[in-house]
Amino acid sequence: MGTPGSWSNRYLLRVVQKLAGDVPVRMAEDGPGKRPVGGPLQPSVVIRNPRVLPAMVLTPEIGFCDGYSQEQIEVEGDLVRVLEAAYRPARSAMTNVLSRWLDWAQANTLRGSRRNIHHHYDLSNDFYRLWLDREMVYTCAYFPHEDCTLEEAQAAKMDLVCRKLWLRPEETVVEAGCGWGALALHMARHYGVRVKAFNISHEQIVYARERAKREGLSSRVEFIEDDFRNISGRFDAFVSVGMLEHLGKANYAEFGRVIRRTIGDCGRGLLHFIGRNYPRPFSVWIRKRIFPGAYAPSLHEAMNVFEPQDLSVLHVENLRAHYAKTLEHWLARFEQSYQAVAERFGPVFARGWRLYLAGSIAAFRVGGLQLFQVVFAGRKCAAQPWTWSNLYAAETEPPAEEQTQRWIRATS
Amino acid sequence: MGTPGSWSNRYLLRVVQKLAGDVPVRMAEDGPGKRPVGGPLQPSVVIRNPRVLPAMVLTPEIGFCDGYSQEQIEVEGDLVRVLEAAYRPARSAMTNVLSRWLDWAQANTLRGSRRNIHHHYDLSNDFYRLWLDREMVYTCAYFPHEDCTLEEAQAAKMDLVCRKLWLRPEETVVEAGCGWGALALHMARHYGVRVKAFNISHEQIVYARERAKREGLSSRVEFIEDDFRNISGRFDAFVSVGMLEHLGKANYAEFGRVIRRTIGDCGRGLLHFIGRNYPRPFSVWIRKRIFPGAYAPSLHEAMNVFEPQDLSVLHVENLRAHYAKTLEHWLARFEQSYQAVAERFGPVFARGWRLYLAGSIAAFRVGGLQLFQVVFAGRKCAAQPWTWSNLYAAETEPPAEEQTQRWIRATS
């Protein structure tokens, strides 16, 4: 590689600087960064080991992210701001090759999905408990007001989903990809519905079943460790929050068939997923290290779920700013637990996850990623809400828990 | 053709009955339809002249609609209910050929658009005045409550559009396809914005300009008789209500380029258009007799306006049920003025328009047509609403007209 200040390294550094745009990149040997008079340190990228430079040129994203994880790259100043400033779909030829290879290697077949989901969600419940809210909701929250707590915002998101589905007591709901079960339990407790919730993450299902038992909701919520493709039976509503991203666009048509089979002509449903303004592959580094098999569709692509099934799209809301804020809460909690994470999983893992959370904040802030909630219904779905005014009317007064609780006791 | 009761006619009638599904079809000679004991007449189709039968088999839609217009076919019972029951995408091979031919013959080039729009919108302002609301709004209204008057619902629609665009005083708005100018004037009067409104219908532009002058808004609203493709300049917001349907999907990419050129990275906009659950051509009869060049896109197709321009979709609402209700109001007023229409334009025209209005009610009721409002923004659009709760909060208290009026007087 030559010495840090060698001709070849200086050349590579210039190329990397070009890719990084306005964010200054320098070798650690060059001394500390410039500090504007009276201001904070100017955000910059510091290369501590020149061995990362070739990778940063060949596959910029992986080179930077792996280098950062392995402490060969440091970021001075606000990590999120640096990632925002550097955010762009910079893809080299090598990145594209790698991207194609990941498409193939991480395909979400029945078996592939199990492997991909296990990689991320079975890390350990204790890990997620360190930085998620107490209900363990690992999807975009909804902040009726910007200064809500994360706990309030996750409850508000679950209520928003339930109101968008105009759930009524004793209706049946199927959930595809239920995480640790918070939404399924929330729907049963507050809206009086009966839920079958599917998930292929073993750790999550075990956790969800225990929680349902503890909270006396096992008779109303059934947690099933199986792929959504094996859902059978007919339900009034279909809901899936944060699963479409793990499906891969090759499976949208099949997803649509499962939805249609499940709700028929008369049901309705909601999908909540990370999306894009226009089609492009997910970050290769995220797919390699964090979320194997992930793909965030544009609405154009997502319509391939609904249109072949003659499902009507009733309502779409983009909650991108809410995901940036959710991730800010997660990152703040993650930093508070940083030592615990680093001790248990090692510093490379801890730094990688910090980067993933910070990078996601940046992507949602600058619009590289979007968050769509899509409400849809079969053609003969009766009794749709006349307007959506009830979505927000309820924000000031949360669902009358006592009332539905009483109701559940009377019927279960 | 043979006598009404000939073998060939009886055969054709059987084919027509098959196409009509559950709605009984009979020859006028067969005597009156059956009346269930104590009930109203069962809705049915009565063939008064067997010469319409071959056309009803070859191109079912045109055969039925032209036959009805020309009084060779009658409908007993509720016309809308009959059309609802018979509603399905019945397309013969001949219909498909005709559909392709219309695609070509009615293409919305600069010149073609002028011809197509002239056909429909330049019929005469007096004609539309007979059955539209007093502001002459010829697009789907929004009924905050089902029993609103048409006048209230059209005002509510215009407010809904303005709130979705979070308009602020002194901002600039460009409107593509402004009809008789009601929305442009409403935005200027109630929201204090400056508007340039484009339309290629000469009759409508003359009317709108006169109204602006009469209402003292000429300094804030400029009505321009030109194609949207010739819009120049930069605006804070882009709005188009009921124009995408007249564009043809071949022109969506260009429409997107015009929008992006107009609002840049920082603006926002709203499209309001008739759509579909999945792609299919517009009714051939409607295109032949009522709306040349019309096409209602699925959301998948409509995304071709936004995605190539990196525009973020922020909000989509399907107002299908509101369009059915709007059309019910229009049809009721049309029936009240039926004699006046028939005297001035002839009975074939009057019956054709009755059928078009009734058929549209049926299509929106059973879900053959949808009505989408899509809000979008450039990637750097600042100060987007944090939630959409203000969309409905304002429904109980309409915009403080006095206040903005005072504001306009002070600045114009």
Image (spheres, coloured by chain):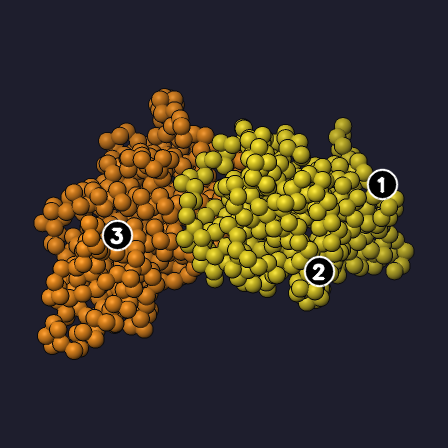
Chain colours: A yellow, B orange
What's the chain of the residue with tag 2? A
Q: Mark 3 to mark 2: distance in Å?
A: 51 Å
Do the residues at pointers 1 and 2 share their chain? Answer: yes
What residue would you read off at disc 3? Answer: B80
Protein chain holding label 1: A
Closer-to-camera residue (A256/A34) = A256
The answer to whether residue B103 is left or right of residue A40 is left
Q: How crowded is the residue under tag 2: few (<14 C-alpha within 10 Å), some, or many (20+)?
A: some
Residues at marks 3 and 2 on the same chain: no
Quarter of the image where one finds residue A148: top right
Query: Can residue B285 be seen in this snapshot?
Result: no
Residue A245 screen position, x and y as percent = 63, 54
- Residue B412 x/y as whole percent: 36, 26
For the residues marked 1 and 3, what is the alpha-carbon distance in whole angstroms?
68 Å
Determine which quarter of the picture holds residue A44: top right
Q: Is residue A161 above or below residue B101?
A: above
The residue that label 2 is drawn on is A114
- Whether residue B4 is visible to the viewer of this picture, yes or no, is yes
